[in-house]
Each structure stands twice: as C-alpha cells, then as structure tokens.
Image (tube, rainbow, N blue to C red):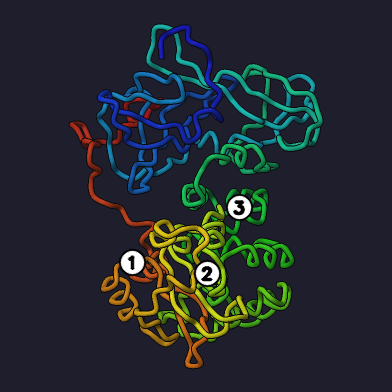
Amino acid sequence: MAAGAPRIFVSHLSGVAVFDPNGDQVGRVRDLVAMLRVGSRPPRLLGLVVEVTSRRRIFLPMTRVTGIESGQVITTGVLNVRRFEQHPTERLVLGELLDRRVYLTGTDEAVTVLDVSVRQLPARRDWEIDKVFVRRGKGGALRRKGETLTVEWSAVTGFSLEEEAQGAENLVATFEELHPADIANVLHHLTPKRRAEVAAALDDDRLADVLEELPEDDQVEILGKLQEERAADVLEAMDPDDAADLLSELPEADKERLLTLMRPHDAADVRRLLAYEERTAGGLMTTEPIVLRPDATIADALARVRKQDLSPALAAQVYVCRPPDETPTGKYLGTVHFQRLLRDPPFTLVGAVVDSDLPPLSPESTLPALTSYLAAYNLVAAPVVDASGSLLGVVTVDDVLDHLLPRDWRETDFHQEPGVPEGPGTADDRAEVSDGR
C-alpha cells in the first residue's frame, strides 16, 4: 500500500483473499495481530492471521505485505507455514478489540467499538491502528440507536488486556459471507469466553450450522453455556444425525432434559438415531432425505432437489417410497439419481425411472460395510431400510468421512501447502517487526 493511501477499516479485511506475486491465491485473512503499547501510542500492527487451504492458520508479517487494494492482499510470496500461536503481548484485532466497551478520554463516556482502521506510516513499512469507530449508548452494531463517531486511538481508554464488557455483534457481522466451516475454525481459535459470546450472538440456524463443523469438545462446551431452551432450539435446527452425535456426548440426565425441551417431532427423530450404535448405518444416517411417491413427476423431483438448504450429497438423488412420505416411510421402491432426472422429460413419473437394482443397507451395517458400498457403487449417499422394507434414512459420504478420519482431524497440521514456499529464514517472523522481542 503506497504512502498516503486511505486508511483501511479492519472489518473490510475479514475473509479477503491473499495472493502471491504471480496471482495465485494462498489463503484468506482471518484476523489481524496487533501489539498494544504504553500510554496513548497507537498499537503497532504486526501482521495478518491467514488461513491456508488446509485450514491451518499461519502468521503473515506486515513486512511481507506489498499491497492491500480492491479487496485483496498481495504478498512477497514467501510465507512461514508453521501454525500461528498468539503471544501474550499480542491482541487479535477482530477477535478481541471489536465490540469492546471503552471510554472517551476526558468525559469517561462509555462507547462500543464497532471497527478500527489501520494505516501504513509514511516512508516506512510499519503499520499501526490509528482510528477507532465507536457508538455512543448501550446498543451494539445491530441495534440502531446511539450516535456513531470516528476518533483517534488516543481519544479512548479501556483497551485493557482483560476480556471485560465485550459483546460480539460486530465480530459476527464480519462472518456474514463466511462458510459455516470457516466460522467454526475462527471460533475454535477464540478463548472460551469469547467463543461463548460469539455463539450467543449467532442466530439459531447459523449456530446450528457452525456446531456441525466444530470438534466435539467445542460443541459440548458451547451447548453447555447456552440457556437450556435455546440449546433445545439449536438442536432442533441441526441435522438430526448431528444433533444425535452431540447429545450422545452429554451425561444422560442432560441429554434427556434437552430432548424433553425439543419439539416432539424433532426429538423423536433424534431418539431413533440414538437407539443405534454410533458406527453403524443407523447411527450415521440422516432422517431427512428427499422422499417422493411413485406418481410424482420428474418436475416435482427437480423442484425438491433445488432447495437451497440441501447438502450436495442429499440433493444427488431422490428416494421413491409408498406413503407415508416421512421416515420411516412406506415400502421403499428404489432411487432416482440426479443425472437421470436431467435426462428424462419433466412430465415423466419417477416410478417409471426408479432404479431398484441396488440393495439398500440395513441399519446394523457397519462402517467398513458402508465405505465398501459407497465405493463399489460410486455413490455419495446410500438408503437405509429396515426389515419391513421402510426407508429409515440415508447415509451420506460426508458423515462416513467424519467417522473414518481421526477424531482430531480438524486440528491436524498438514504438510507444506502447494504454492506456499517455506522460504529462507523460518525463525519466528514476528521477531523482525515486534518491539523489543
């Protein structure tokens, strides 16, 4: 960024793509690292936390940033791919400074931090936080009341190292365009207190999607800090198989209490799944596939497949059954794959094109049997049928992978990324930009 360029508000950097000099994307910005300084001196911006393709978060020093423009960050191309670890004197700008209650110098009026801006110092490669965008009154970013103003860093006090009086509305606002898996990765790296604040600020559906992507320990921790009525609402918004997996990690009394608070229909689906062993088709299946009667048309099927909230695996095929249409259904007749739906006229009945050749799985099928079935028939989902011939649910390939990978696979450090050279000088890069370390 050239000297004299406009200041950049950090909320605009969340999720921005990071490129090497050749134009190849190496990751995305997930946070900024700053060092608070003595007195009213503005914090020095040390670097960026960048998430590379394996979801590992690495540290990118500002000395290796050559440009920030048009929604992108350009680097020198030399990155240290070791996992980022926050030092005690460092602060994550998005994770720890936004939403904080601070005070205007001179009047001691309490204000809420909505954003901060950074700038590059003239004729130097150093960056610092120079302005603070605040709101007067008690409302957060999502409450439209209270005057907003931009002040110098030196005009506010209260950016202490303790986590006090901090909400999460403005941090949540930076998540708007992120995939739930990316939000889960951000939450996993926050402190437990901050994680609980962010979870409380997310709406039920968004939190449900994020919980499905988190490690089990984080899921249990977050659910345990919600009020029980809200915890039940979030469980209802989760896929039944994911809700069952989460509830199976809780003590029996807590599990039963939450099931009692859930809507009877949702609780019944989860209870059915909890009755099966975890690493079986019954324990892994979801109870909400696309079920159609044989007299439905291909046009009906395509309309169901187009629903936005369906995962790709569930949208890949429809299941033809006698009524009732909800699981457990009437007699299971077979499957119609998405490609077949595209090849036949819209007025064709699904009963006329159903594939009944593949044998369904039983709910007792083991994990090795599931993987062999999906691999042998090149499928992304498999029907699970009981002894009476009713469709109970389907097992999708993503749920199988979740149970095949190590329990801590979300935490695993992968080897060096393609296109992200380690480069010379792999000692801690922050040593070259920090004050007196």
Measuring 47% from the left and 32% from the top, which residue is drawn there?
32
Q: Tell me the quarter of the image containing the N terminus.
A: top left
Q: As drawn, which residue projects farthest toward the bottom?
A: 387
**Three-letter amino acid code of the residue under disc 2:** Pro
Q: Is residue 70 left or right of residue 60?
A: right
Pointer 2 residue = 289
Q: Is residue 218 visible?
A: no
> Would you call the spot at circle 2 few (<14 residues within 10 Å), some (14-19), or many (20 or more)?
many
Label 3 secondary element: helix
Mark drawn on residue 280: none
**Three-letter amino acid code of the residue under disc 1:** Leu
Label 2 secondary element: loop
> Residue 295 placed where, x, y %?
56, 72
> Would you call the spot at circle 3 few (<14 residues within 10 Å), some (14-19), or many (20 or more)?
some
Q: Please tell me in which quadrant of the rendered image residue 304 appears.
A: bottom right
Q: Tell me the quarter of the image containing the C terminus.
A: top left
Say which of marks 2 and 1 sits in front. Answer: 2
Q: Nearer the viewer, residue 323 or 97?
A: 323
Q: Measured along the vertical axis of the image, is residue 7 above or below residue 282? A: above
The reply to whether dot 2 and dot 3 touch (C-beta < 8 Å) is: no
Q: Is residue 230 left or right of residue 61?
A: right
Q: Is residue 397 visible?
A: yes
> Separation of disc 2 and disc 3 at Cα?
21 Å
> Would you call the spot at circle 1 few (<14 residues within 10 Å), some (14-19), or many (20 or more)?
few
Compare marks 2 and 1 and give the one earlier in the sequence. 2
Compare marks 2 and 3 and give the one earlier in the sequence. 3
The reply to whether dot 2 and dot 1 touch (C-beta < 8 Å) is: no
Pointer 1 residue = 405
Pointer 3 residue = 206
